[in-house]
Each structure stands twice: as structure tokens, then as C-alpha cells.
């Protein structure tokens, strides 16, 4: 019986030794996984940073192209606006002259003298006044 107890004791110790061995292997596997994740995550973060920098660079280039295109369109629109403004000013001048002519004609038809008529009469009046002064001898 003592042999049987010793054998069971040896079996238990062997089993405990195996369990300890497996437990140690599991522990070491966990530590290895932790270490690998730490290394790989650092590399992964570096890769993410590089990818982010590339995306940022492409984004900046695209924005610069878009801004340049928009500025070009603005310059084109300004030039077109200047051209249209010049044409509008010419047309407004023509309309104003036509309006002035028609108003002057209407006023003339109802007997109201034009500015030109009044200026011509003023010149004639000054000439007559000068002639009268010479004839009468008054200066």
C-alpha cells in the first residue's frame, strides 16, 4: 500500500509538474503576445502617420488646384464684367443723348428756347450792348 501511495504521490507531482509547465507556457505566450502587440502597434501607428501625411499632401495639392481654378474663373468674370460695364455705359450715353434730344425738341415745339438758343441770344445781346455803347459814346 505504501507503494501505491507513493505511486499516486508521484503521479500527482508529475501531473502538477505538467500543469505548471502548461501554465508557464500559457503565461509566456501571453507575455509574447503582449510584446508583439506593443511592437506591431508602434509600427502600425507609424504606418498610419505616413498614410495620413500622404493624404494631407494630396489634399493640399487638390485644394491649391481648386483655389487656382476658382481665382482664374474670378479673373475671367471680372474681365467679362468690365467689358459688359463698358457696353452698358455706351448704351446709357446713347439713351441719355436721345432723351436730351427728344426733350429739347418737345420743349422747342411748345416754344421754350433751348440752352443753345439762350446762349446765342446772350452773345447777340452783348454785341448789341457793345455797339450801342460805341454809338452813344458811353463806355
Image (tube, rainbow, N blue to C red):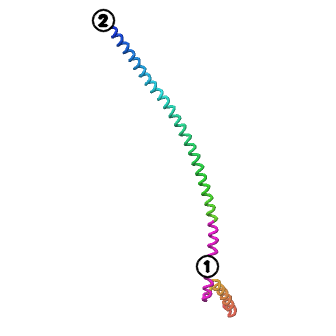
Measured from the top left, where is residue 85 in percent x and y? 62, 66
**Residues rendered magenta in the picture:** 84-112
Please tell me whether residue 26 is drawn above or below residue 105 in the rendered image: above
Is 132 magenta? The answer is no
In the image, residue 73 sits, relative to residue 51, either above or below, namely below
Q: In which quarter of the image is residue 77?
A: bottom right
Residue displayed at 63% across by 73% down: 93
Where is mark 2, residue-wise? 2
- Badge 1 element: helix
Q: Magenta stretch: dominant SS?
A: helix
Residue 99 in picture, x, y percent from top left: 61, 79
Crowding near the residue tagged with mark 1, few <14, some 14–19, many ≥20 C-alpha atoms within 10 Å: few
Label pair 2/1, CB-CB below 8 angstroms:
no
Residue ID for mark 1? 99
Residue 10 pos. (x, y %): 35, 10
Image quadrant containing the C terminus: bottom right
Q: Quadrant of the N terminus?
A: top left
Residue in the image at 69% along x and 93% along y: 135
| Marks 2/1: CA–CA distance | 137 Å
- Name the element at disc 2: helix
Amino acid at each position: 500500500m505504501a507503494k501505491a501511495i507513493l505511486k499516486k504521490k508521484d503521479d500527482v507531482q508529475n501531473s502538477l509538474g505538467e500543469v505548471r509547465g502548461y501554465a508557464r507556457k500559457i503565461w509566456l505566450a501571453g507575455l509574447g503576445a503582449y510584446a508583439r502587440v506593443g511592437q506591431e502597434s508602434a509600427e502600425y501607428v507609424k504606418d498610419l502617420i505616413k498614410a495620413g501625411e500622404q493624404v494631407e499632401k494630396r489634399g493640399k495639392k487638390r485644394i491649391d488646384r481648386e483655389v487656382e481654378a476658382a481665382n482664374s474663373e474670378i479673373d475671367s468674370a471680372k474681365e467679362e464684367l468690365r467689358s459688359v460695364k463698358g457696353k452698358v455705359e455706351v448704351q446709357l450715353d446713347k439713351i441719355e443723348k436721345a432723351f436730351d434730344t427728344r426733350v429739347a425738341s418737345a420743349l422747342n415745339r411748345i416754344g421754350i428756347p433751348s440752352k443753345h438758343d439762350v446762349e446765342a441770344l446772350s452773345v447777340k445781346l452783348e454785341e448789341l450792348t457793345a455797339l450801342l455803347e460805341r454809338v452813344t459814346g458811353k463806355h
